[in-house]
Image: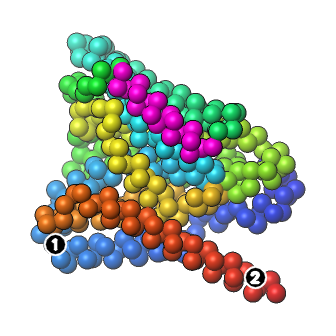
Amino acid sequence: MNSELNRTPYLKKRVPFKLNGLDGNILRLVTIMLAIFVLASVTKPASFLSLANFLSMEKQLVEYGLMAIGVSIAMIAGGIDLSVVYIANLSAIISGMFMQKFALMATGPEQVLFITLAILLGILTGILCGAFNGFLIARLRIPAMLATLGTMQLYMGIAIVITKGGIVSGLPRPFTLLGTTLVFEIFPLSFVIYILAVIVVAYVIAKTKFGTRVYLLGTNSKAAKFAGIKNHNIIIKAYMLSGVLGATAGLLSLARINSAKADFGSSFVMLTILIAVLGGVNPDGGKGKIYGIFLATVIVQLISSYLNMFPQISNFYRDMIFGVALIAILIVNYVLDKKKEAKLIRMSQ
């Protein structure tokens, strides 16, 4: 890989290799997060600073946090994944139906075996859905937005057909423990799984050849191809990883609420994009950090929980608020990028 980078000095300059330090965006996110936390703590101390509120926030952010990482990986690679929410739903439904048929009537080790197989089946569903997304984009050259918009409807349609528009619920208790168990009485097990996923994916994206090639591909796909990178394979793998993260989110959601439905979490589509952009991912590709996505997820959850403490603010306003926030972030990022370009031009003169 080093030889590839040495042959492509342009890419070497553009790819964000400083992945360990705190860049300006990470510092901004930490500042915003602390500011919201202090504001909520001062104005609503009794309800915001309660253990019940923190447990609720930890449980809620897990699902769309994992989906946001999947969307971000696709965006870093120069695309987008609009289907990740419905991959999550389809994976949860398939796993849930498998458990209903085999695990509910089983006991002991046999039940554990069937639950394990159901989880693996859900993950496999995510892999196959992600691979299909990648195939449409990489091999058939369908624009990522159109391809995943189409598969979004496809996966939701499949889920509706196999459930006949109903809800999959009533799962074995050993499985639902994934969504209800507390670690040290303060961390939901699902939140611990989420943190581990953040660490693993951050390492993969920042420290492996695959991650470096994802950045190269998102920065300049033609130059990446001339560097000897198999763009098709990287795209497919990136969407497969997004599918795995979506499936994991679906399984954890299934365990938490003990049910799954074809159109569950439809509002998460916009929310995951908001988190990705807020976290520092460039919609054009080639830029973004997983830890930035994590901080952005926490910020969005803090805002959402804080808004819940004002009964006079209807939930109907929430999408509008997040929509305005997304537009504002895009404008701010545009202004900051222009300032950086102007500064680089002055330094080069």
Residue 183 in the image: above or below residue 119: below
**Residue annotated with mark 2:** 345
> Does 160 appear in magenta?
yes
Dot 2 lies on which element? Answer: helix
Q: Position of residue 97 (x, y in %)?
A: 31, 20
**Residue annotated with mark 1:** 44
Point out the stretch of residues depicted in magenta: 143-161
Residue 21, quarter of picture:
bottom right
Instruction: Tell me which residue sits at (15%, 72%) in the image.
Output: 45
Q: Given the image, on which type of amino acid does mark 1 rest?
A: Lys
The answer to whether residue 215 shows anywhere in this view is: no
Q: Position of residue 74 (x, y in %)?
A: 57, 47
Q: Compare residues 182 and 58 and report the one nearer the observer.
A: 58
Q: Position of residue 136 (x, y in %)?
A: 63, 33
Instruction: Tell me which residue sits at (47%, 40%) in the image.
Output: 83
The answer to whether residue 249 shows anywhere in this view is: yes
